[in-house]
Amino acid sequence: MATTVSLLAYALTGEELPIRDTDGSTRDFLAALDEAGWPADRVVRLANDAWEKQIGWPYPLPPHSLDVVGAAQWYAALTDVRAALGLDAIQQAPSRRTVLNEAERRLMVDLPPHHGRVG
């Protein structure tokens, strides 16, 4: 059964790790991750490499993973871990798409008056 700890480890490393249960603190999770062979500096290098290569990081979870853990609990834990690692400023890779699709072009034309176009 997936736990917050195992899902965090997967999202940060891209690997299913044998990781021990923790007391729920970010510090204890990072210690458990280190014990599983992923010290903080290795996770930071992986995240930075993914950003440079424009690969999504943290890694996406398998479908239905959050059915057991819960989305709010998951995102709170992930946010805390990213902040502790100094990775909270890393963004998802920018979209390579530069041309608007048809629906986006219609939306750009159909702006309400309070967007600066008057009569």
Image (cartoon, grey):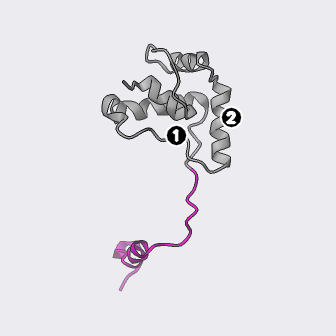
What's the residue at 51%, 18% (across, down)? 19
Magenta stretch encompasses residue 79 = no
Q: Percent position (x, y) of residue 68?
A: 32, 29
Amino acid, disc 2: Arg
Camera-nearest residue between 12 and 104: 12
Magenta stretch, residue numbers: 93-119
Disc 2 target residue: 45
Q: Quadrant of the C terminus?
A: bottom left
Task: Look at label 1 and name its amino acid.
Answer: Tyr
SS for tag 1? Answer: loop
State the image coordinates of residue 54 (x, y, percent, origin top left).
Answer: 62, 51
Residue lying farthest to the bottom in this orientation: 119
Q: Position of residue 94 (x, y in %)?
A: 57, 56
- The quarter of the picture where residue 14 lies is top right
Q: Quadrant of the N terminus?
A: top left
Vertical placement of residue 30 versus 56, above or below: above
Count of all numbered marks drawn on residues in the image: 2
Residue at 60% from the left image edge and 48% from the top image edge? 55
- For the residues labelled 1 and 2, the Cα–Cα distance comes to 14 Å
Q: Position of residue 45 (x, y in %)?
A: 68, 34
Pointer 1 residue: 59
Looking at the rendered image, the disc whose residue lies closer to the viewer, 1 or 2, is 1
Q: Nearer the viewer, residue 16 or 102?
A: 16
Secondary structure under tag 2 reads: helix
Name the residue: 38% across, 41% down.
63
Q: Is residue 78 above or below residue 116?
A: above
